Amino acid sequence: MSDRTGVGIVGAGAISAQYLRTLTRAPDLDVRFVADLDTERARARAAEFDVPGSGTLDALLADDAVRIVVNLTVPRAHVDVALTALAAGRHVWNEKPLALDRAGGRAVLDAARSAGLRVATAPDTVLGPGFQRALRLVRSGAIGTPLSALAQVQNPGPERWHPDPAFLYGAGAGPLLDLGPYYLTALVHLFGPVTRVQAVAARSREERVIGSGPKAGERFPVTVATQVSALYAFAGGESAQALFSFDSPLRRQRLEVTGTDASVVVGDPNMFDPVPEVHHADGSVLRTAPIRTRIGRGVGVVELARAIRAGEPERASGELAYHVLDVMLATLETATSGKVIDIHSTCERPALFPSTIREGEVD
Ligand SMILES: NC(=O)c1ccc[n+]([C@@H]2O[C@H](COP(=O)([O-])OP(=O)(O)OC[C@H]3O[C@@H](n4cnc5c(N)ncnc54)[C@H](O)[C@@H]3O)[C@@H](O)[C@H]2O)c1
């Protein structure tokens, strides 16, 4: 039997190519199958990356050598696919968000716990060398005592480039649930769990128009807030101010952390290679070295496989993802009610990374 960990992908859409590029290069993974409701799409994606099997999720689960199911379906399918994989005795890597609601998220974590299996969840950009460098700077005292953060992600919306973007304006998405996981997961790595949130939100249009691909020109409904402004308080007393918007002609993605001695400009937590800078009150700036990495989406699956083998906790844990989901849902609830919401879920702050995966190792 192979000593590599067998992996099967479910969902052969836009993001699957980035995952397959990473996973098929990882020396200790064996990518065996690509599944999709659209089996022709699965076949084509499998062929592109020399993956031997393709077809339905049932056919994937019939392959006993698949130990981790990588769930890259659209958000509304995340829970069903994850529960099906767990019921078949497989560990799960889930794209974000973990679920559409708290009940779905809890059901996935409970099913994993009772079966002795793992659930880990995107984003894994927080495991990339750029964010990890910023995290090391903060944890080593380079900015003094951390006080606050500014998180901003604003753009005109993904219908300009995504060929099938309707799901990005429905339950489980919008700028908060689609892009919020990158920023909120990074903030939890930096500060620990969120304890309180207050927000306002708005939807600028009832419909949007697909801007590229075979469906270009088609209209689709918008059912979620497309601009969300939020304030977060953290367990250690830190705070963050955040903007998540698909209503902005101006594109900006930034995460900055301010401490008593300096501020660190982290860069875009949706990327693996932002180069952090440390800004001091006297105007001096510590610019850190350029980052050259081919680590990409899927590195969290590599880390999960190694954590399972080592009997150690994985960093992109389901508990962290559940906490981030709870915080995002509370953000939308406070925007509706106008009342500050206390957050009762919590999670461990993940350990620094990499200890075992080095840049270039999955090249
Ligand atoms: N596109 C991106 O740049 C990007 C980036 C990061 C994360 N993500 C996340 O990845 C996930 C997928 O996004 P995408 O852009 O690849 O979507 P997509 O619409 O391009 O692809 C999704 C695929 O999942 C398949 N699918 C849906 N339900 C299924 C089911 N029940 N069983 C099997 N297959 C099913 C669809 O047929 C489709 O091929 C989402 O959660 C998204 O938030 C996307």
Image: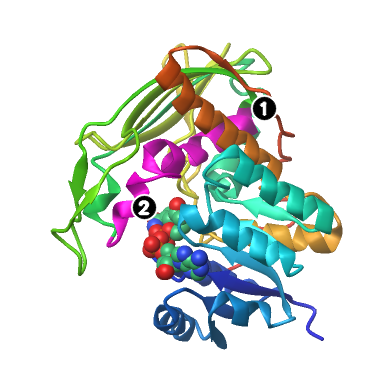
Image point (79%, 49%), residue name: 313
Q: Residue 153 in the image: state x and y as whole percent.
A: 36, 34
Q: Amino acid at mark 1?
A: Gly
Secondary structure beneath dot 1 equals loop
Near mark 1 (Cα within 10 A), the count class, few <14, some 14-19 or many ≥20, is many
Q: Is residue 250 magenta?
A: no
Please give the residue where the numbered disc 1 appears in the rendered image. 192
The magenta-colored residue range is: 163-190
Quadrant position of the C terminus in the picture: bottom right
Q: Nearer the viewer, mark 2 or mark 1?
A: 2
Q: Is mark 2 within 8 Å of ligand 1?
A: yes
- Whether residue 353 appears in this view of the structure is no
Q: Residue 285 in the image: state x and y as whole percent.
A: 45, 25
Q: Amino acid at mark 2?
A: Phe
Residue 307 higher or lower than 57, as above or below: above
Please give the residue where the numbered disc 2 appears in the rendered image. 167
Secondary structure beneath dot 2 equals helix
Image point (74%, 40%), residue name: 351
Q: Is residue 184 magenta?
A: yes
The number of discs equals 2
